Amino acid sequence: MSKSHDEEHTQKAFGWAARDNSGILSPFHFTRRVNGDEDITIKILYCGICHADLHVTRDEFGSGVFPVVPGHEIVGVVTQVGSNVEKFKIGDKVGVGNLVGSCRACENCQQELEPYCPKAETTYTMFDFGTGKKNYGGYSDFYVVNEHFVVRFPENLPLDAGAPLLCAGITIYSPMKYYGLDKSGMHLGVVGLGGLGHVAVKFAKALGMKVTVISTSPSKEKEAIDRLGADSFLVSKDSDQMKSAVGTMDGIIDTVSAPHPFAPLIDLLKTHGKLVVVGGSVKPVELPIFPLLMGRKLVGGSAAGGLKETQEMIDFAGKHNIVADIELISMDYVNTAMDRLAKGDIRYRFVIDIANTLNVN
Ligand code: NAP
Ligand code: ZN
């Protein structure tokens, strides 16, 4: 007979949790499972704040999974290894993204597409699947995880600014690879210059692509071009600017976190162009059909990436010195950070300095 949650989770842990849809986070004591034979234990050093954390803590997905300890951009150091662990040793610098479990046997798992496994388990519980199982995320002191779901962190990358790659990085890298939007000389549009969008610009430039940022914020134009290296910038609400770029893009990665019209984006695509949506807006959008037919265009989606690809992504980032532009914050600043993220007042990712500021009490 399998053990109950409490029998299995006997280690005391500490983090910050939201208890209701106010989204307000506060100190929270909970338990984690003991380190199993294939597990490693990670002392968390840094954790990025993904917009998904805001969606879930404010219950914008309507899943009501409280209490929720968010955090799936985890970087830390290995403090314990199980007897069957092969990849890691104590002291290694490692990362965990938004996946910590899958069946490891289905067609998706066999193709190293773990996010699409029907039994995929997210690092913190985002939806209630009625299993009674609950995961708590990285706004906490340590994490126990099967080694399969852990990546090795490149030596040369800073741990704090590298943390957002574990979700933001793989979420844009995986669709760029899968949809073939990764070829030098191609023209890529990036919609929404936030946490995901700004790393999309960096990866696309490292791949030798031409990049146009499509944004609602004219104030981001100068830094998009001067600092992030984008080639051009379109203000999505300026119809003249949008018209000037009709039919010019091979693909678009759409990272927007709220409902917005697809029609003007589809118009920007060349024949055979692809609009790939990764933003997590829950409301359905209207899809114009004729603009798709008249150009054999495609609209697709993508969720994070498999573990093999996540390692490939972070190694690529290490080789090309790609990290996020971050604002490093203390744990007790998290509620202000969430309010600022909701308003788009961040360039471009908050990262929590867990090791130095999570005061266990
Ligand atoms: P973020 O930092 O808040 O960036 C989102 C950007 O979207 C904003 O900076 C803004 O850019 C634009 N935007 C926001 N509201 C908008 C609106 N109403 N209309 C048009 N544009 C708007 O968020 P993030 O962390 O990058 O995450 C983006 C989305 O991806 C979230 O929904 C998140 O849940 C989702 N996500 C999905 C996956 C996945 O596996 N598919 C993984 C991680 C995150 P501008 O100012 O440039 O317009
Ligand atoms: Zn995320």
Image (cartoon, rainbow, N blue to C red):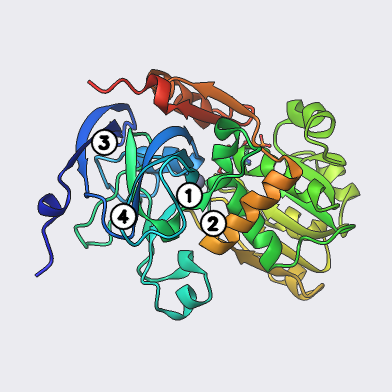
| Residue drawn at x 63%, y 57% as measured from the top left | 312
* Crowd tier of the residue under label 4, counting other residues whose Cα lies within 10 Å: few below 14, some 14–19, many 20 or above: some
Cβ–Cβ under 8 Å for marks 2 and 3: no
**Distance of mark 1 from mark 2, alpha carbons?**
9 Å
Q: Which numbered dot is residue 304? A: 2
Of the residues shown, which amino acid type is indicated by label 2?
Answer: Ala
Q: Camera-side residue: 9 or 292?
A: 9
Q: Which numbered dot is residue 344? A: none
Q: Position of residue 115 (x, y in %)?
A: 47, 64
**Distance of mark 2 from mark 4, alpha carbons?**
27 Å
| Residue drawn at x 71%, y 57% as measured from the top left | 263
Under 8 Å from ligand 1: the CB of mark 2? yes
Q: Find residue 229 and report its image quarter.
A: top right
Of the residues shown, which amino acid type is indicated by label 1?
Answer: Gly
Q: Mark 4 against mark 1, which lies toward the viewer? A: 4
Under 8 Å from ligand 2: the CB of mark 1? yes
Q: Mark 2 against mark 4, which lies toward the viewer? A: 4
Give whichever of discs 2 and 3 has the lower sequence position: 3
Under 8 Å from ligand 2: the CB of mark 4? no
**Distance of mark 4 from mark 1, alpha carbons?**
20 Å
Of the residues shown, which amino acid type is indicated by label 3?
Answer: Asp
Residue 192, visible in the rendered structure? no
Which quarter of the rendered picture does the N terminus lie within? bottom left
Residue identifier under label 3:
20
Q: Mark 3 against mark 4, which lies toward the viewer? A: 4
Cβ–Cβ under 8 Å for marks 1 and 2: yes
Q: Camera-side residue: 93 or 355?
A: 93
**Distance of mark 3 from mark 4, alpha carbons?**
35 Å
Residue identifier under label 1:
97
At mark 3, the secondary structure is loop
